[in-house]
Amino acid sequence: MIFLKTDDEIELLRQSNLLVGKTLAEVAKLITPGVTTRQLDKVAEEFIRDHGAIPTFKGFPNPYGGPFPASLCTSVNEQVVHGIPNDTPLKDGDIVSVDCGVLLNGFCGDSAYTFCVGDVKPEILALLEHTKEALYKGIELAVHGKRLGDIGYAIQQYCESYSYGVVREFVGHGIGREMHEDPQVPNYGKRGTGSLLKKGMCIAIEPMITLGDRQIQMESDRWTITTRDHKCAAHFEHSVAIGMGKADILSSFEYIEQVLGDKAI
Ligand code: MG
Ligand code: MG
């Protein structure tokens, strides 16, 4: 069931999502060769709790195993999503997707950004740039009267024009009082198909795009998803409210990109 949000509820969702953006900016300050993803996670959890919110990922149940043990998903290189923070230092040339979710005043925020660690290869940098652009191609269609398939089609067409893989097993989602609400928001699809988008719907759009084949696998930790061909994957996510003629982006990369300066994707 899709819950439509009132304007007041959308403002609360915006506050939650802005806190996610600010948390990711705190993480951005630390990303450099030698830092561990566990260090990033610790800083993020403290920042979230200091702002009166709860990290929604921590303790998130898993149908395949134990609950998620951390506040961030940190997915390095061939890891696509749901990577668990650990003590392995990031190294020059890595990329790391950092996905963050919070619960504040009863509403959820959810957003992700893929960062470069030092200098990355041009083809990997291009993957990040194009994945971020694909997210905005999808957001352009997150308007009243369009359909979910229009969003997926736009993302898929754009990414496949660069011969990237579009992951299908994981999708975006409705967002509100729960982090994952209906509808599912695939990054592939056919124009004019799927649920009708209506003002008041709030969704997280999150393309997961690979440099090679789109095939993925789950690692033995029962969380981390990696590409089968071990090529890099990128992941960018915004939470948006469906608007009349224009989507209202509730999360923000502005805080992150102020920190990154000319290193912004
Ligand atoms: Mg997310
Ligand atoms: Mg999400």
Image: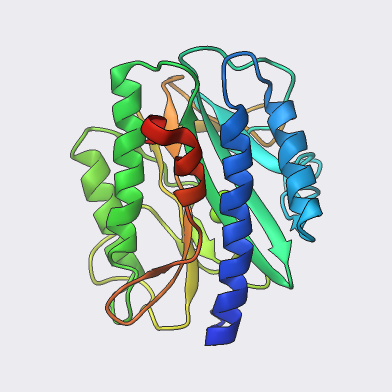
Which quarter of the rendering shows the C terminus? top left
Place of residue 188 in the rendered image (x, y in percent of width and height, measured from the top left): 33, 53
Query: In which quadrant will I find the N terminus?
Result: bottom right
Q: Quadrant of ligand 2?
A: bottom right
User: Which residue is at a point 25% across and 56% down the rendered structure image?
Assistant: 154
Relative horizontal placement of residue 201, taking residue 178 as reference (left or right): left
Quadrant for residue 26, please give it: top right
Residue occupying the point 80% across, 52% down: 50
Q: Residue at x 47, y 24 (%)?
A: 228
* Image-based side of 101 in relation to 158, left or right: right
Decide: is 230 above or below 84.
Answer: above
Residue 80, horizontal then vertical, whole percent: 51, 34
Q: Viewer-proximal residue, 119 or 87? A: 119
Rendered view: 219 above or below 19: above
Query: Can residue 210 be seen here?
Result: yes
Residue 52 placement: quadrant? bottom right
Q: Report x, y in % for residue 264.
A: 40, 35
Residue at figure coordinates x 30%, y 48% from the top left = 134
The spot of residue 231 in percent (x, y) is 41, 21
Compared to residue 123, the image places residue 177 above or below, namely below
Residue closest to the eye, 223 or 85: 85
Direction from residue 179 to residue 126 in the image, left or right: left
